[in-house]
Image: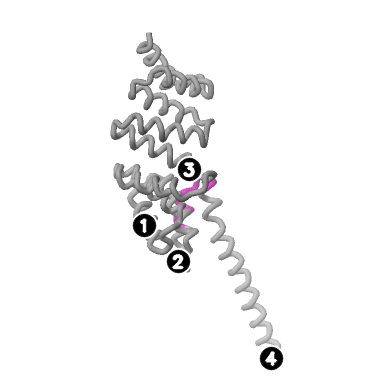
């Protein structure tokens, strides 16, 4: 009887250890799922993590990234705000809340969060270029093209290999009437992506204005 009890105790501990290992693996999977493009699955893992630990900020961050990528912007906005209620100065949540609000068309609110991010994040912050890009797009929406030029110039300075950003910079400059500078931006976009129709057409328009 004593041996049987000992066997059951060992079996229970073994089961508990295996369950713990699988639980830890599941917690680490959310970011892997996100990077693998499995956004819905990443959200589900994060939701489970938050049930287990409501103050787990990492889970809120990955969840919001996944929700934005999955175009669930209203839910991303809500979840990011919940995370910020727990950790008000988390720059990752501040930036992703800006993205959610941008896609919901809440331009003024989105701008506030992007400005908070660029004002507080280190110069090499991973979302610095993206924040400047979204700020530029908001300024374009508002027809504030000089401001868009400044923001998008900062964006391409941070991440100079994105032809679409150079194209948007060219457009902002074109709309502001800075045609020579617009051509320069379109040229860079075409250098990075010679098949860009938007950059090619923008360059033609700007060159026609110069002539």
* Mark toward the start of the polypeptide (3 vs 2): 2
The percent position of residue 107, horizontal first and vertical second, equals 30, 42
178 inside magenta stretch: no
Which label belongs to residue 55?
Answer: 2
In this figure, which residue is indicated by the disc labeled 3? 128
Identity of the residue drawn at 45% across and 21% down: 186
Q: Residues within 10 Å of mark 2 (few under 14, many from 20)?
A: some
Q: Give the spatial CA distance, label 3 vs label 1.
A: 20 Å
41 inside magenta stretch: yes
Question: Residue 93, relative to residue 168: is it above or below?
Answer: below
| Residue closest to the eye, 104 or 173 | 173
Give the number of the mark in front: 3 or 4.
3
Judging from the image, what secondary structure is the residue with disc 1 in? Answer: helix
Give the magenta range: 35-44
In this figure, which residue is indicated by the disc labeled 1? 81
Identity of the residue drawn at 45% across and 66% down: 55
Q: Give the spatial CA distance, label 3 vs label 4.
A: 64 Å
In this figure, which residue is indicated by the disc labeled 4? 2
* Mark toward the start of the polypeptide (1 vs 4): 4
The percent position of residue 9, horizontal first and vertical second, equals 64, 82
| Residue closest to the eye, 41 or 111 | 111
């Amino acid at each position: 009887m004593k041996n049987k009890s000992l066997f059951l105790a060992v079996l229970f501990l073994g089961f508990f250890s295996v369950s713990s290992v699988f639980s830890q693996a599941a917690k680490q999977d959310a970011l892997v799922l996100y990077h693998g493009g499995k956004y819905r699955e990443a959200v589900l893992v994060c939701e489970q993590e938050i049930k287990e630990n409501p103050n787990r900020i990492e889970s809120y961050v990955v969840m919001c990234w996944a929700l934005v990528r999955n175009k669930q912007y209203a839910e991303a906005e809500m979840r990011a705000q919940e995370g910020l209620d727990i950790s008000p100065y988390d720059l990752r949540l501040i930036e992703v809340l800006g993205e959610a609000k941008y896609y919901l068309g809440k331009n003024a609110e989105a701008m506030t969060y992007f400005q908070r991010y660029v004002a507080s994040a280190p110069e090499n912050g991973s979302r610095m270029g993206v924040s400047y890009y979204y700020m530029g797009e908001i300024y374009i929406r508002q027809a504030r093209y000089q401001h868009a030029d400044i923001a998008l110039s900062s964006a391409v300075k941070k991440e100079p290999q994105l032809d679409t950003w150079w194209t948007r910079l060219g457009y902002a400059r074109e709309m502001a009437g800075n045609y020579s500078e617009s051509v320069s931006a379109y040229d860079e976009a075409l250098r990075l992506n010679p098949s860009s129709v938007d950059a090619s057409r923008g360059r033609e328009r700007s060159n026609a204005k110069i002539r």
